[in-house]
Amino acid sequence: MIKFLDLQKVTAKYADEIHAAVNRVVDSGWYLQGEENKKFEADYAEYIGTNFAVGCGNGLDALIWIFRAYVEMGVMKPGDEVIVPANTYIASILAITENGLKPVLVEPSLENYQIDDSKIEDAITEKTKAILIVHLYGQCAYTDKIGELCRKYHLKLVEDNAQAHGCMYHGRKTGSLGDAAGHSFYPGKNLGAFGDAGAVTTDDEELAKVVRAVANYGSQRKYVFKYQGRNSRLDEIQAAVLDTKLKHLDEDIAIRKQVAKFYIEHIANPRIITPVVKDWDAHVFHIFTIRCAQRDALQQYLTENGIQTVIHYPIPPHKQECYKEWNNLSFPITEQIHREELSLPMSPVMTEEEVKKVVEVVNGWNL
Ligand SMILES: *Cc1c(COP(=O)(O)O)cnc(C)c1O
């Protein structure tokens, strides 16, 4: 079977370096908030192109801490609104509601699945304080128009960069385009830890300080508590693993792009829509999406023919039980994407043979 993502193989590729890094931490006797964190934060900030990176427990927390810090800083208050794409992973939305802020859902474009910037201005009200863009599937969601709207209405621009480490917009990395960005290092992400891990990047020194404090019991000095914080720190072992893997991220992204190019050039089944890529720097292919009106039948056929696929995502946020109050809302484009999306195997360890086999099977499908 061709796996959707073979994590064992992903790790094996750099096994010697990773084992050395893990052993270094094990032998050091220092497991939290030490030199490994400092090194990874410095290297990651440099990679993204921001002044600060602050490690934390996971990607959801990274986003939660950004909004929490803005509330603590008096930039936002409960009841304020945050514009966010209607088609995103639930974490983007949870980070907003967790802080008593109100998500205002905006439809994506059917061409690239990113927030439709022509629909944002209508959603802005007196209470709007921020736009949270999500670089979904690893593709840049930022546009110059979004930047202009943020300046015109004095809105913070927050990026959910969980799926897009290494993605570029006109020479700058996503995660450095707005006021702050949340990053996830969940094992399956392009830069993945051996468990949960996350980070916030920003150029705003005050924000970085507050994020670091709220993720560490609300403390800036030991045993002195400025905020009612929580415990959400990056483990030293995870920081060491991430710093090791960061060195190879760009070569891994290059392989993802080769796989994506092959898929796009060779998938020729009239029922299947492959991604539209206008700028190859602006997509790191965390996920390779196809769309198909008979998605479920296609997925079953692929499974029967030894190809594992995943749906990102089967139920949109506004149809989830945890947001009952939105269940009657209608977002037709979002719903269509959730009905038709299918993710093909994609990773930096796929063999040429495997990629060819996927194409062959996909092209051989006719109902
Ligand atoms: C993975 C992901 C998150 C959350 O990251 P975790 O580390 O799993 O908490 C947030 N947003 C998006 C778009 C994601 O894909």
Image (tube, rainbow, N blue to C red):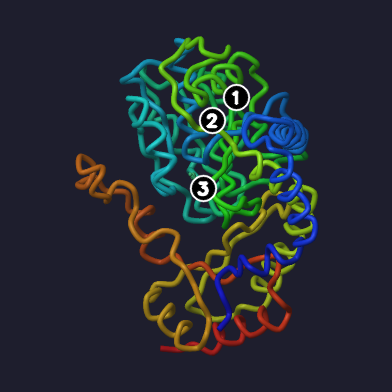
Per the rendering, the mark at residue 179 is 1
Badge 1 marks a residue whose secondary structure is loop
**Is there CB contact under 8 Å for labels 2 and 1?**
yes
Query: Dot 3, how many residues are within 10 Å of its Cα: few (below 14), some (14-19), or many (20+)?
Result: many
**Is there CB contact under 8 Å for labels 1 and 3?**
no
Q: Position of residue 136 (x, y in %)?
A: 53, 49
Q: Amino acid at mark 3?
A: Gln
**Is there CB contact under 8 Å for labels 2 and 3?**
no
Q: Position of residue 198 (x, y in %)?
A: 57, 39
Residue with the mark numbered 3: 114
Q: Count the marks.
A: 3
Measuring 64% from the left and 26% from the top, which residue is drawn there? Answer: 202
Of 21 and 46, the residue lying toward us:
21
Residue with the mark numbered 2: 158
- Position of residue 173 in the picture relative to residue 319 (left or right): right
Measuring 54% from the left and 22% from the top, which residue is drawn there? Answer: 211
Q: Amino acid at mark 1?
A: Asp
